[in-house]
Structures are given as C-alpha cells and as structure tokens.
C-alpha cells in the first residue's frame, strides 16, 4: 500500500537489531547456530537466507523456549520483503508463544503486526494492534511512533479528528517530532483549516528543512489559501476599484 507506507514511522534499525540480538535460550547447538546465522543474514539485508536460517531453527527445535523470538524475526524478514500477509502470520505465531510477563516482546510484535496490517490496508486491525501496544506499555520509548502510525490509519479511515488526537499525543511526547507536525498539517489541510495547517507545516519544515515533502505540503497549503482568499475578497476588491 503506497499511501500508508509513505508516512509510516519506522523505529530506528539499531533498536530493532538490539531486539533481534536477544539471546534465544533453550536450543541445542544446531538451533542456536541457525539462529545466529539468521541474525547475521538479517543485518546484511539478506532476507531470504535469514528466513531459511530461522525456519531451520523451528525445524530443529520446534518447542524451543524462545521460539516467539524466532517467529518475530521471521515476521520482520518477511516484512522487509514486503510479504505482509506472511509477516502477519509469523507475528501472530509469536504472540501465541510470548510468555505471560513478556510485555516488551508483545509490544514490539503488536507494533510491527500493526504496521503490516496498515500496509495491506486493513486499518481496523492496524488500529487494534496499535491500541493494544499503547495499552500494554503506555510509557514505552517508542510510544510516539505508535501514536503517529495509528494516526495515519485513522486518516485512511477518514476519521480526521482521531488522527489529530494521535498526532497531538505524539507531539506532546516529543515536541520536535517533525513527522507528526507534517501529519497534523496534512489533516488540518484536509479539514480546510488552512491557518492551522500552515502553522504545523512551517514547524515541520523548521525542524527538518531537508525533507522536501514538508516544503511541498507547505507550498500547496499556501497556494490553496491564496485561492481561497481571492475567492473571498476578490469581489470586494473589484468593487472598490470601480469607484
């Protein structure tokens, strides 16, 4: 899905790799070897080979203690290949195996399954997963990203008020989160609140002037406002000129 993927906020890859590198305990030496290979291939962006290695882990140790991590890693590799349906399947298997106290693991899986649902335009399911993650760990270090991504799901459902709430929540957590200023500017623009749209678009440009799409949106909003102003005041100006 082009629209959703364009605006999706992806958590920094270094954090993802930190999660991926969590030790998978409870395996025999062959399973552990395949697991470590899978991590290396993933880091190299050799996702086919990563998938093969993680699949071998499950074949060698089908009841491994941390198989939820293996399924999560498989889900991530399929996500990177844009095989979103398969990614969702693997994330769902991971959720089924996460220990009762594994809230941090479940948060990450819900986040990325939500991202996958968003890619295939299943926005209700995406919102459900994002909401589940927020409820699970409301103070998570990437909670702003969850609010941001959920906002775009609300936009795709046409619920602009909910989108504004989520973008505002993300901004309240990180006042320098330029992506959410851009998103909120876009929503104000869709709601024809051009003054607020300009304010947020300017802030996005200020925070990240190198991002051309921010500047493009600001230009589009200003152009639209100019047309609206001409439509509103044009007749009065013309009447004044005739006197």
Image: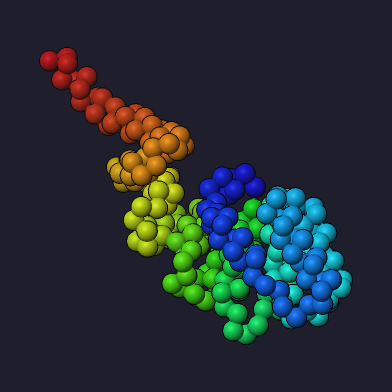
- The residue lying at 34 percent from left, 56 percent from top is 175
Quarter holding residue 220: top left
Q: Residue 4 placed where, x, y %? A: 58, 49
Quarter holding residue 32: bottom right
- The residue lying at 65 percent from left, 66 percent from top is 21
- The residue lying at 64 percent from left, 53 percent from top is 119
Q: Quadrant of the C terminus?
A: top left
- Relative to 70, say whether 181 is above or below: above
- Name the residue at the right extreme: 59
- Relative to 25, say whether 211 is above or below: above
Quarter holding residue 76: bottom right
Q: Residue 91 placed where, x, y %? A: 70, 67
- Name the residue at the bottom extreme: 100
User: Is residue 42 visible from the viewing direction of this image?
Assistant: yes
Q: As rendered, which of 176 and 17 lies closer to the eye? A: 17
Q: Is 69 displayed left or right of 30 in the figure? A: left
- The residue lying at 67 percent from left, 78 percent from top is 98
- Relative to 183, say whether 148 is above or below: below
User: Is residue 83 visible from the viewing direction of this image?
Assistant: no
Q: Residue 40 placed where, x, y %? A: 72, 57
- Name the residue at the left extreme: 243
Q: As rendered, which of 199 and 146 lies closer to the eye? A: 146
- Relative to 160, say whether 217 is above or below: above
Q: Is 142 displayed left or right of 35 in the figure? A: left
Number of marks in the rendered image: 0
Q: How is the image coloured?
A: rainbow
Q: Residue 151 placed where, x, y %? A: 48, 57
């Amino acid at each position: 899905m082009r629209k959703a993927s364009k605006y999706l906020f992806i958590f920094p890859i270094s954090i993802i790799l930190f999660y991926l590198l969590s030790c998978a305990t409870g395996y025999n030496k062959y399973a552990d070897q395949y697991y470590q290979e899978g991590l290396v291939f993933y880091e190299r962006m050799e996702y086919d080979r990563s998938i093969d290695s993680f699949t071998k882990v499950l074949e060698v140790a089908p009841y491994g203690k941390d198989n939820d991590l293996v399924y999560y890693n498989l889900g991530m590799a399929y996500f990177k290949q844009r095989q979103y349906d398969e990614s969702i399947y693997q994330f769902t298997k991971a959720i089924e195996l996460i220990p009762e106290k594994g809230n941090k693991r479940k948060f990450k899986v819900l986040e990325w399954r939500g991202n996958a649902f968003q890619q295939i335009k299943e926005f209700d399911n995406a919102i459900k997963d994002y909401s589940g993650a927020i409820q699970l760990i409301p103070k998570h270090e990437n909670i702003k990203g969850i609010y941001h991504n959920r906002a775009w799901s609300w936009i795709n459902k046409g619920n602009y008020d909910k989108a504004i709430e989520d973008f505002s929540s993300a901004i309240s957590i990180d006042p320098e989160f330029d992506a959410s200023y851009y998103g909120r500017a876009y929503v104000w623009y869709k709601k024809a609140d051009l003054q607020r749209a300009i304010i947020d678009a300017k802030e996005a440009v200020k925070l990240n002037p190198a991002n051309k799409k921010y500047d493009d949106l600001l230009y589009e909003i200003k152009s639209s406002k100019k047309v609206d102003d001409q439509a509103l005041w044009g007749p009065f100006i013309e009447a004044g000129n005739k006197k």
